[in-house]
Image: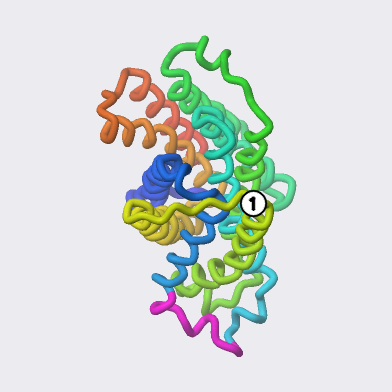
Amino acid sequence: MHAKLNPSTLVLLTLPPILWAGNAVVGRMIAPLISPMTLNLLRWAIAFALLLPLAAPVLRRGSALWQSWPRFAMLGMLSIGGYNALLYLSLNTSTPINVTLVGASMPVWMLLIGRVFFGMRISGKQWLGAALSIGGVMLVLSRGQLDVLLQVRLVPGDMYMLLASAAWAYYSWMLAHPTTEPTEIRRDWSAFLLAQIALGLVWSSLSAGAEWALGLGRLDLSWGLAAALLFVALGPALLAYRAYGAGVARAGPAVAGFFINLVPLFTAVLSAVFLGELPHLYHALAFVLIVGGIWVSASRR
């Protein structure tokens, strides 16, 4: 798929990293109040309720959804029941710097999965773009100091984020190859997303049920937690997924994957806003590297 980046596509692919950065910040803030699988389930249950008035007919008996339910179940498992659950689990079992560092492997996963499962040809420019993008992320994580990166030690919990990155990469490629999806659902973004959420909630429910059965469940209800759940359901879930799906359709998953590496940069910006930490020169240099990686990867070959 040839990548084409125009202003509207840039907006579509930049909005999700901003919202997902907010998701990571909020997820860390409320970790003491709610266990990860329960958080994932409640987030998507709220998103389901918000989206239902727009696309309820897609769930009715006889809908084209049920003719292609295995594909939507797969999409829901990879994104809603897989990536998001593993992300929240990572935020509970590993350090933020480790989680973001492992998540920086996304462009590489995009290229490898595209090559192995979808027959994509990988060019030298794409590998160069991946290297530049990951270099930008590492610059943010190290705060411009090499010795900080050398001190990073991966722990078993970081495997959750590695699996999450691979799941999201495969999900992105499935979005770009809608060959088995009913046209009437694919053309209606709300129906398409609701179909994924409905079947994704099955996976999320199983994970949350197992969490409570093992005695690991945690839920401390408060108005602050309710506000946080509403935010992660409306912004990082509905709005971000809508924008990302449209962006992948325009630019292709390989290019879209590079935009995800803007998440740690936006996280640093949010930290500056909420924690009063002023941006540094290395933030600007990281931005140049990440955007450079996007430009190189999307340029004509």
Q: Main secondary structure of the magenta part?
A: helix
Residue at 37 percent across and 60 percent down: it is: 234
Q: Is residue 17 magenta?
A: no
**Quadrant, the C terminus:** top right
225 to 74, vertically: above or below: above
Q: How many marks?
A: 1
Front-most of 139 and 125? 139
Q: Amino acid at mark 1?
A: Gly
Specify the farthest residue to the top.
Answer: 147
User: In the drawing, does residue 301 fall left or right of residue 53?
Assistant: right
Front-most of 110 and 118? 110
Residue at 45 percent across and 49 percent down: it is: 4
Please tell me in which quadrant of the rendered image residue 246 appears: bottom left
Front-most of 231 and 5? 231
Look at the image and tell me whether residue 40 can be seen. yes
User: In the drawing, does residue 229 fall left or right of residue 184?
Assistant: left
Q: Which residue in the protein does label 1 denote?
A: 215
Which structural element holds mark 1? loop
| Residue 110 point in image, percent of width and height | 61, 43
| Residue 43 point in image, percent of width and height | 46, 59
Residue at 57 percent across and 60 percent down: it is: 175
285 to 82, vertically: above or below: above
Residue at 66 percent across and 43 percent down: it is: 163
Q: Which residues are magenta?
A: 52-62
| Residue 205 point in image, percent of width and height | 61, 64
> Crowdedness of circle 1 by 10 Å Cα count: few (<14), some, many (20+)?
few
